[in-house]
Image (cartoon, rainbow, N blue to C red):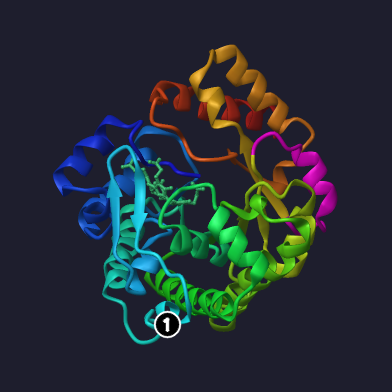
């Protein structure tokens, strides 16, 4: 989940220096710096590239802005001509800068720490392209249900560009990838196969054609009982799990080779230390270490005190040591 962000004073300083969130994403030195900041503070095992899932539609030609206190504002698509104008082949100048960041991070990261690259999943990215920002997704859902021709063309183009984006991240030094389908939980189970599993599988196949067996985590947020089906359909190595779902239940849906990642509620970082520690214990209890990547169920929120993150990491390490 999100490691960098407004809860870290050192991040806010760099972001100010960059001018805006987007300028930060496209400034390799500064994006490298904010990727590494959490690793300097906390005893983590992996870094996640600092970028955003909306870099892909931006590279495809849609204008993008992040408005203070409002979140992303993305140019929208609404019909076939709009979709046909989107770039999906050739080179993308936005990607060059992100790939440069990946290279800088890999050389600045201690050798025993891993670097996770990422992209958004086609359903979530397409929903932003239809809605223009973080909204209730009603328009995107209506389009998904009506399934016009342009919607399928849109998903296919996002798949193609995402593969290019991820292959470049691997070439530059990413050692695992995570695909974020933050809005998968909006869809009825009957649409999960076509709109979540299939396009993610196409991305994974495209990546593994060049890098066989490359480790990939699929985070389909909010699909509770369908994690197993999605993991099987996509051949993910691990599934990211949202909060308030039992990891043991999800493990029960998976074959032995698939791990879970998650799923402490980020809200617990805003409460007392006692409730945080109880939450950590309930996430870890009964989940085998060999099949678990400890993480939050969603991103860290801006009011979080970094000291609480430190306490969280220490608690996970203590639990680790008691078991091994
Ligand atoms: O540690 C990291 O920062 C990793 C990099 C990362 C970011 N976004 C940076 C970011 C990752 C992996 C993401 C993924 C992302 N971006 C998702 C999927 C995961 C999820 O959260 O569900 C989505 C849906 C987005 C789109 C997006 N980006 C939104 C809706 C927002 C605004 C929300 C907010 O918190 O203001 C962003 C902004 C964003 N992306 C921030 C960061 C650190 C916050 C902006 C800031 O702190 O300056």
**What residue lies at 28% left-to-right and 67% top-to-bottom?**
100
Q: Does 60 sit above or below residue 75?
A: below
Q: Taking the image as drawn, is residue 141 in sight?
A: yes
Q: Position of residue 106 (x, y in %)?
A: 36, 59
167 vs 69: above or below: below
Q: Quadrant of the C terminus?
A: top right
Along the line of sight, which residue is nearer the eye, 242 or 211?
242
Q: Confirm whether the magenta stretch covers residue 191.
A: no
As drawn, 14 above or below 272? below
Residue 32 can be seen, yes or no: no
In the image: residue 139, left or right of residue 48? right
Which residue is rendered at x = 42% and y = 54% of the image? 111
**Residue 251 part of the magenta segment:** yes
293 displayed left or right of 175: right
Q: Is residue 41 above or below residue 165?
A: above
Q: Nearer the viewer, residue 84 or 222?
A: 84
Task: State the SS at label 1.
Answer: helix
Mark 1 sits on what residue? 81
Relative to 102, is 159 on the left or the right? Answer: right
Image coordinates of residue 22 in percent, x first then y, are 26, 54
User: In this image, 140 relative to 130: left or right?
Assistant: right
Question: Depth check: 127 or 197 in front?
Answer: 127
> Residue shown at 20%/42% (left/top)?
14
| Stretch in magenta | 243-258
Residue at position x 36%, y 63% from top?
A: 55
Total residue callouts: 1
Q: Would you call the spot at circle 1 few (<14 residues within 10 Å), some (14-19), or many (20 or more)?
A: few
Residue 160 x %, y % = 50, 80
> x and y percent of residue 189 in the render?
77, 57
């Amino acid at each position: 989940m999100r490691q960098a962000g407004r809860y870290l004073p050192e991040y806010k300083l760099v972001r100010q220096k960059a001018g805006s969130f987007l300028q930060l994403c496209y400034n390799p030195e500064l994006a490298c710096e904010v990727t590494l900041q959490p690793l300097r503070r906390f005893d983590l095992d992996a870094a996640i590239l600092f970028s955003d899932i909306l870099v892909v539609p931006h590279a495809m030609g849609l204008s993008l802005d992040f408005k203070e206190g409002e979140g992303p504002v993305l140019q929208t698509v609404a019909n076939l001509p709009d979709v046909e104008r989107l770039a999906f082949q050739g080179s993308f100048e936005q990607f060059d800068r992100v790939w440069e960041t990946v290279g800088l991070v890999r050389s600045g990261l201690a050798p025993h720490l891993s670097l996770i690259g990422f992209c958004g999943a086609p359903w979530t990215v397409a929903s932003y392209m239809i809605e223009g920002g973080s909204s209730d997704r009603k328009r995107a859902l209506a389009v998904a249900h009506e399934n016009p021709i342009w919607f399928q063309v849109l998903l296919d183009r996002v798949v193609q560009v995402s593969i290019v984006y991820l292959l470049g991240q691997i070439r530059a030094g990413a050692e695992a990838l995570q695909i974020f389908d933050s809005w998968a939980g909006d869809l009825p189970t009957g649409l999960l196969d076509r709109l979540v599993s299939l396009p993610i599988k196409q991305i994974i196949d495209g990546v593994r054609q060049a890098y066989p067996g490359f480790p990939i985590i699929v985070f389909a947020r909010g699909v509770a009982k369908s994690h197993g089906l999605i993991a099987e359909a996509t051949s993910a190595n691990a599934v990211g799990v949202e909060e308030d779902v039992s990891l043991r239940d999800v493990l029960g849906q998976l074959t032995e080779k698939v791990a879970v990642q998650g799923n402490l509620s980020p809200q617990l970082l805003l409460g007392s230390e006692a409730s945080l520690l109880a939450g950590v214990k309930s996430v870890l209890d009964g989940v085998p270490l060999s099949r678990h990547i400890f993480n939050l169920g969603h991103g860290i929120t801006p009011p979080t005190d970094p000291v609480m993150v430190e306490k969280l990491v220490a608690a996970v390490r203590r639990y680790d040591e008691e078991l091994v």
